[in-house]
Image (spheres, rainbow, N blue to C red):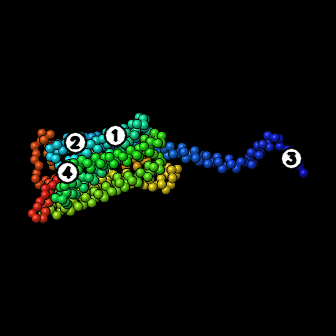
């Protein structure tokens, strides 16, 4: 039998460490490494913010230039409508134009933010202010579109009975209430988002639990319900106009096209963003913060692009709601020294025949 030399004390120590590992270290160290990796991934989910940034910034730039020009062009004739013609629609249009302009003024800083790899360097207070105006005015605009559609619906379907509630004062109060509700909601969201230090300014990768909860409300109250209101209102408007015996088929078709255009542009601008917002939130709720980061990396470019597409609405509002109004177009002609008169049979004026030989002339746009 061969003799085996005894190990030295240092060799004994080495063998003990390698052959009898501490169970506590085995169980804790991997957990620490996993937690650290998850924490590092949480910071920005490992997203490549350079992907698509030029396209997104260019889209914001186009909206800024086009939206600023269109809203500035129509703001003055809308103010004339408010001062001189004293109709209800002009109150909503004025608030919508102001809302869109405030939204548009935030876009240059948003462009800088996108081109800077979604890293905010202008300080926390400016971040909160810009994000607050950006998101608040998006939803104020959406709800004002609902107010306009409901006002048109009441004017067409209930032209006599709605006279008591369709007033300039009511329009002003409703616009103020809409603004107050949206500001309050986003103030709460901004405070919750500000509790986490993050250079991404209002965005969270992955989402926070409190922000995820508010996203369900944003989808429902800021997109789904307004969409249903628009569809209902413009369907009833078209039905009411279609029953008018004094309106030609050509004018009825114009109203129909306008109704489809309003709903179509609303879907084009807001559906992609809100559907992706809903999917992001659902994935976060189902998978948790760590696992959802892989999904965030896949959809980041498309989601950011959908947010930029939603800004198109601020540039298209003047076309749909202002430039189709014949009285406003007439004011613009006068402002630029052009001759023109408003036709009594124009699209903006529709005469609805009522029982007992009553008729009501109303403005659709």
Contact (Cβ within 8 Å) of mark 4 with mark 2: no
Disc 4 on helix, strand or loop? loop
Q: Position of residue 37 (x, y in %)?
A: 56, 45
Neighbour tally class for label 2: few under 14, some 14-19, many 20 plus, Cα within 10 Å:
many
Disc 1 on helix, strand or loop? loop
Tag nearer the camera, 1 or 3: 1
Q: Nearer the viewer, residue 53 or 265?
A: 265
Neighbour tally class for label 3: few under 14, some 14-19, many 20 plus, Cα within 10 Å:
few
Contact (Cβ within 8 Å) of mark 1 with mark 3: no
Nearest to N terminus: mark 1 or mark 4: 1
Distance CA(mark 1)–CA(mark 3): 81 Å
Nearest to N terminus: mark 2 or mark 3: 3
Q: Nearer the viewer, residue 337 or 71?
A: 71
Residue ID for mark 1 = 106
Residue ID for mark 2 = 75
Total label count? Answer: 4
Distance CA(mark 4)–CA(mark 3): 105 Å
Contact (Cβ within 8 Å) of mark 4 with mark 3: no
Residue ID for mark 3 = 4
| Name of the residue lying farthest toward the right | 1
Distance CA(mark 4)–CA(mark 2): 21 Å
Nearest to N terminus: mark 4 or mark 3: 3
Nearest to N terminus: mark 2 or mark 1: 2
Neighbour tally class for label 4: few under 14, some 14-19, many 20 plus, Cα within 10 Å:
some
Nearest to N terminus: mark 4 or mark 2: 2
Question: In the drawing, does residue 164 fall left or right of residue 66?
Answer: left
Contact (Cβ within 8 Å) of mark 2 with mark 1: no
Q: Quadrant of residue 17?
A: top right
């Amino acid at each position: 039998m061969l003799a085996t030399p005894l190990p030295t004390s240092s060799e004994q120590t080495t063998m003990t460490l390698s052959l009898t590992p501490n169970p506590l270290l085995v169980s804790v160290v991997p957990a620490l490494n996993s937690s650290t990796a998850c924490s590092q991934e949480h910071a920005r989910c490992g997203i490549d913010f350079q992907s698509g940034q030029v396209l997104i910034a260019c889209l914001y730039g186009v909206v800024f230039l086009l939206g600023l020009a269109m809203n500035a062009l129509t703001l003055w004739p809308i103010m004339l409508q408010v001062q001189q013609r004293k109709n209800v629609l002009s109150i909503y249009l004025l608030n919508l134009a102001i809302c869109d302009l405030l939204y548009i003024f935030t876009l240059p800083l948003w462009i800088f933010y996108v081109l800077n790899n979604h890293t905010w360097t202008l300080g926390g207070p400016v971040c909160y202010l810009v994000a607050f105006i950006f998101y608040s005015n998006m939803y104020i605009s959406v709800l004002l579109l609902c107010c306009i559609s409901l006002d048109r619906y009441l004017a067409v379907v209930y032209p006599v009975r709605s006279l008591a509630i369709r007033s300039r004062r009511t329009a002003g109060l409703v616009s103020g209430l809409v603004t107050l509700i949206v500001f309050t909601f986003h103030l709460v969201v901004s405070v919750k988002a500000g509790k986490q230090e993050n250079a991404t300014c209002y965005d969270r990768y992955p989402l926070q639990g409190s922000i995820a909860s508010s996203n369900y409300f944003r989808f429902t109250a800021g997109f789904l319900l307004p969409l249903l209101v628009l569809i209902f209102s413009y369907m009833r408007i078209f039905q009411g106009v279609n029953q008018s015996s004094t309106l030609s088929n050509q004018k009825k078709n114009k109203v129909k096209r306008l109704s489809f255009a309003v709903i179509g542009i609303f879907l084009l601008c807001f559906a992609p963003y809100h559907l992706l917002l809903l999917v992001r939130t659902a994935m976060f709720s189902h998978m948790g913060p760590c696992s959802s980061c892989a999904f965030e990396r896949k959809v980041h470019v498309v989601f950011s692009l959908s947010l930029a597409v939603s800004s198109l609405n601020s540039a298209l509002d003047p076309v749909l709601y202002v430039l189709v109004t014949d009285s406003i177009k007439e004011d613009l002609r006068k402002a630029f020294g052009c001759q023109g008169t408003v036709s009594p049979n124009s699209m903006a004026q529709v005469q609805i025949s009522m029982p007992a030989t009553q008729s009501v002339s109303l403005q659709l746009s």
